[in-house]
Each structure stands twice: as structure tokens, then as C-alpha cells.
């Protein structure tokens, strides 16, 4: 969730900074150019004031020209060009130069910026807003023209053609400062976004971890106070209250099952004893009394299994770092005599590998799985027990050569009291695999069922290899 929320916040903040940065960059460029334009307007106004008093047109030769006022204007223009490198000139209405510097610079006859500014000034409108010159326009120039007015008429025009190298450099420097400021602001925004998302999502992560713990059987897990927005803190309190209520209900159910199983055992034992006494009064081999004995023993087994299931769901697992291969090999050796008696080959491939499990609970679960495999495997077939390890789990796979299960039956296998209609005559209560699953879940393990080709059932027991939270290395 953080990977989705953080980019969204960063994109929004970057959009805001760009939306502020572009107008600011344009403003800096405009301010730099406006400063140059104002300075050039002042210069042209000064030259226009000098040109007002020049009444004679030059003869074409500076040596023969004796007009002192025009000479003064020419001297000012030459000095201006020498100092600032700016082309400047005063031109009559017919574009003939009154004075200009450098000497080889004349008004172009095309439709460029200089001619446009000259034509504007002839209409008594000076250059106040020339086109913007950007830092990447290396050949860009600023042209400013002002009219020379005498007796209310425009008699000449002062034109300056300025290079923009320094102005573009200052604009670029201002843009670099803006980029640096935007970068620093973006870093601060990213840091703020990290803190904000961490503050908002910390309670969500704690809630998610606690939900996972409860889903895997650790019902006593609760959401710890982790700060965050008030709504999430209120959600955490509500979740803890819900978990308390659910745990109370489940505890009451387990207590009821355990108490009922325990209370029914004594009357059932007394009933079985009376059946045995009654059997002494009946002829030997009576089928009815044999059927009653069988059903009584089956009911006693069901009560024992119910009590075991209630205890398995209630007791906490004693997790230890266990050699799964050695434990599986012991269970295979313990069940081999019964397999030999039934004519079933029981083999084990149990290399040494470790996992975190309750040895007693795992042994009971493997006993239930192997017992179930031997029950349904016909004579001459094989039951295999294989131990393997992966990155995060150790697996114990038990395969048999029995009839197997259909797809619908695979969805229900492991449910309490469920037995396939084809196997109703096989001894059992339908609680063995449920007890095994409860024992494994208490330690973070799991059990899965699938078909074994060409026939039979494949049961996979998974045990975590990483130490669970709170476990102590034995």
C-alpha cells in the first residue's frame, strides 16, 4: 500500500512545484529583459534629446561635416558602442543616418526586428515590449527605438540593437537557483511524504500482521497502540474488542466440547460395562450384542477424538528447532510393523533437515496421516514418506496407493466428522485429519491434499524453517 500511496503523493507534490516553478522562471526571464529594455529606453531618450538640435543633414563625409551638434551626437554614439558593444544610431524618416555607430551599421531593409521597431517609432510609439529572448536563443537581440520629435513631428528615430549574452546568462543563473530551490523543496516534500505515509500506514501494518496471526491460529494476538490518525486508532480498538469477543466465543465452544466429551465418557463406560454383563447372559456369538459392542466402542472413540480436538485447538504449541527428517524416520519405523502385517510397503526418504515445530504435535499429525494412508492402501501397494526442504519451509509428503478421492471429496477432506461414502465401513471417527490440521496450525504449519498419480492420495505437511516470533531456540 505504501508503494502505491507514496508515488501518488510525490507526483502531486512534483506537479505543485512545477506549476509554481514554470511561472517563476518566466517571471525571472521577463524581469531580466525588462531591466535591459528600461535601460535602453533611457539611453535612446538621451540620444533623442541630443538629436533634436541637429537640423542639418550630413553631407556624407565626416571630415567635411562641420555641424558641431551632430558631431557631439556621433561622438556619444561611438563612445556608447565602444563601452557597451551596443549598436546605436539616429536615422531620418527616409532611413538615412544622422549618426550611427559602428560606422558600417545601417538600418536593414527587410522585415526583421530592427525595421519593425523603426516603423513603430515613426508612428510615435516607442519600443516598450520587445519579444522575449530566452537563454537558449544564442542569436537573440533586443531592439529599442524611440522617436525624435521636433515641433510635434517625428523627424528621426533613435535605434539601439543590443546583444543579450549577459542578460541570458543572468536569466540562466536565476533559473539554476530556481531548480536548486525546487530540488531542495522536492527533497523536503519526499521526506515529508515518507513521514506522512509511515504515520498513516503504521497502524495498518500492525493491523495486517495481527490479522494474519489470528488467521493462522494465534488468537491471543492483539493490535498494539501504534499512533496514526484517530480513525485508525479507533479501528484498532474496535478490532481488539472484536478479537476478544471471537476468542471468548471459541473458548466457550471448546470448553463445551471438552466438558461434554469428558462428562459423557463415564456414563458411556458404565453402559459398556452393563453391555458386557448382559452379554454373559446371552448365548455366545449373538450378533446383536456384538453390534452393540462395536457401536459402543466407536462412540467411545468419537468422544476421545472430540476431547483430543478440543485440547489441540486450545493448547499452545511448544515450538522448537527440530530435525524433521529424524522425526519422520522414527514415525516410519514405528508404523512399519503394522504395514508389514497388512502387506503394504512403507518406505521413507528422510534426509536430515530442520524446521520449527512442536515435536509432540508433529509426531501426532504424522501418525494420523500415515495411519490414514495404511487404512486405505490395499495389500501389495506402497506408502511413501518423503522429506524435503525449500527456502522457507520443510515438507513431509505422504503418498499412498489407495483408491484416492474425487475433486468434490478433496474439497471436503479434513473437515470434522467427514468421511467418504465409499469408506464408511472403515474404522475411524472422521476426526483424525482435523486433529492433525489443528496441531499443525498451532505451530504455523499446514496440511494440503491432492491426487497421487496413477491412483491414491498425496498429503503434504509444511513446517516453517524460520523461527516464529517469540520462539526460543532449544
Image (spheres, helix red, strand yellow):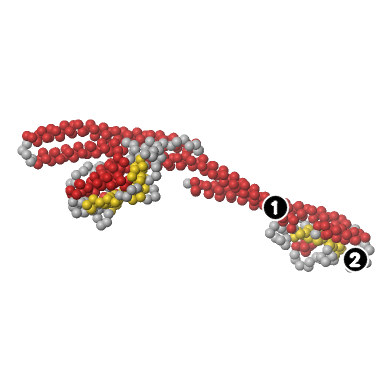
In the depicted view, which residue is nearer to us: 166 or 377?
Answer: 377
Res 431 → quadrant: top left
173 vs 196: above or below: below
Question: Where, quadrant-wise, is the C terminus in this rendering?
Answer: top left
Question: Residue drawn 88% across and 57% down?
Answer: 50
425 vs 58: above or below: above
How far across and down, in percent of the image, does residue 137 sit? 70, 60
Asked whether, in this view, residue 18 is left or right of residue 298, the answer is right
- Res. 173 mark: 1
Asked whether, in this view, residue 318 is left or right of residue 160, the answer is left
Circle 1 crowding by C-alpha within 10 Å: few under 14, some 14–19, many from 20: some
Q: Secondary structure at mark 1?
A: helix
Question: Residue drawn 71% across and 61% down?
Answer: 138
How far across and down, in percent of the image, does residue 185 sit? 61, 46
How far across and down, in percent of the image, does residue 429 sit? 22, 42
Q: Secondary structure at mark 2?
A: loop
- Res. 193 mark: none
User: Can residue 25 be seen from the camera position used here?
Assistant: no
Res 454 → quadrant: bottom left
232 vs 89: above or below: above
Q: Which residue is mark 2?
A: 62
Label 1 or label 2, whichever comes before in sequence order: 2
Question: Residue drawn 48% across and 37% down?
Answer: 226
How far across and down, in percent of the image, does residue 218 sit? 37, 38
- Work out how far the residue at label 1 is from the one at label 2, CA to CA, in angstroms: 44 Å
In the depicted view, which residue is nearer to us: 321 or 175?
Answer: 321
Asked whether, in this view, residue 320 is left or right of residue 47, the answer is left
User: Can residue 131 be seen from the camera position used here?
Assistant: yes
Res 432 → quadrant: top left
Asked whether, in this view, residue 278 is left or right of residue 347, the answer is left
Q: Nearer the viewer, mark 1 or mark 2?
A: 1
Amino acid at each position: 500500500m505504501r508503494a502505491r500511496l507514496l508515488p501518488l503523493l510525490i507526483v502531486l507534490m512534483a506537479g505543485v512545484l512545477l506549476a509554481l516553478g514554470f511561472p517563476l522562471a518566466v517571471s525571472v526571464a521577463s524581469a531580466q529583459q525588462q531591466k535591459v529594455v528600461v535601460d535602453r529606453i533611457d539611453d535612446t531618450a538621451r540620444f533623442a534629446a541630443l538629436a533634436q538640435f541637429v537640423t542639418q543633414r550630413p553631407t556624407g563625409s565626416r571630415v567635411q561635416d562641420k555641424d558641431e551638434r551632430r558631431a557631439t551626437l556621433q561622438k556619444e554614439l561611438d563612445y556608447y558602442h565602444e563601452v557597451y558593444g551596443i549598436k546605436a544610431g539616429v536615422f531620418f524618416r527616409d532611413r538615412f543616418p544622422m549618426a550611427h555607430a559602428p560606422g558600417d551599421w545601417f538600418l536593414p531593409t527587410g522585415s526583421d526586428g530592427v525595421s519593425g521597431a523603426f516603423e513603430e517609432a515613426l508612428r510615435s510609439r516607442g519600443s516598450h515590449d520587445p519579444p522575449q529572448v530566452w537563454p537558449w536563443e544564442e542569436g537573440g537581440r533586443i531592439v529599442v527605438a524611440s522617436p525624435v520629435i521636433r515641433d510635434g513631428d517625428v523627424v528621426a528615430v533613435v535605434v539601439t540593437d543590443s546583444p543579450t549574452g549577459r542578460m541570458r546568462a543572468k536569466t540562466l543563473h536565476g533559473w539554476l537557483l530556481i531548480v536548486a530551490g525546487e530540488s531542495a523543496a522536492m527533497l523536503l516534500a519526499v521526506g515529508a511524504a515518507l513521514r506522512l505515509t509511515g504515520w498513516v500506514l503504521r497502524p495498518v501494518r500492525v493491523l495486517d500482521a495481527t490479522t494474519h496471526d489470528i488467521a493462522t491460529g494465534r488468537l491471543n494476538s492483539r493490535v498494539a497502540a501504534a499512533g496514526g490518525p484517530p480513525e485508525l486508532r479507533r479501528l484498532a480498538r474496535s478490532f481488539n474488542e472484536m478479537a476478544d469477543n471471537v476468542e471468548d466465543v471459541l473458548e466457550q465452544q471448546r470448553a463445551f466440547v471438552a466438558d461434554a466429551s469428558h462428562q459423557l465418557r463415564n456414563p458411556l463406560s458404565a453402559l459398556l460395562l452393563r453391555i458386557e454383563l448382559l452379554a454373559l447372559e446371552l448365548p455366545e456369538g449373538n450378533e446383536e450384542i456384538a453390534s452393540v459392542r462395536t457401536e459402543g466402542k466407536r462412540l467411545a472413540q468419537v468422544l476421545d477424538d472430540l476431547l483430543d480436538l478440543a485440547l489441540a485447538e486450545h493448547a499452545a504449541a511448544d515450538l522448537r528447532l527440530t530435525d524433521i527428517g529424524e522425526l519422520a524416520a522414527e514415525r516410519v519405523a514405528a508404523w512399519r510393523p503394522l504395514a508389514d502385517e497388512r502387506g503394504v510397503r512403507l518406505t521413507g526418504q528422510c534426509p536430515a533437515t530442520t524446521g520449527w515445530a512442536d515435536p509432540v504435535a508433529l509426531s501426532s499429525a504424522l501418525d494420523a496421516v500415515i495411519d490414514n494412508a495404511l487404512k486405505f492402501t490395499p495389500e501389495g501397494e506402497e506408502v511413501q514418506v518423503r522429506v524435503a526442504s525449500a527456502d522457507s519451509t520443510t515438507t513431509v509428503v505422504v503418498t499412498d496407493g489407495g483408491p484416492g478421492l474425487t475433486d468434490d471429496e478433496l474439497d471436503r477432506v479434513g473437515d470434522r466428522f467427514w468421511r467418504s461414502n465409499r469408506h464408511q465401513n472403515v474404522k475411524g471417527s472422521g476426526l483424525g485429519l482435523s486433529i492433525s490440521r489443528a496441531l499443525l496450525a498451532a505451530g504455523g504449519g499446514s496440511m494440503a491434499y491432492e491426487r497421487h498419480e496413477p491412483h491414491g492420495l498425496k498429503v503434504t505437511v509444511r513446517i516453517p524453517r524460520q523461527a516464529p516470533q517469540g520462539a526460543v531456540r532449544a
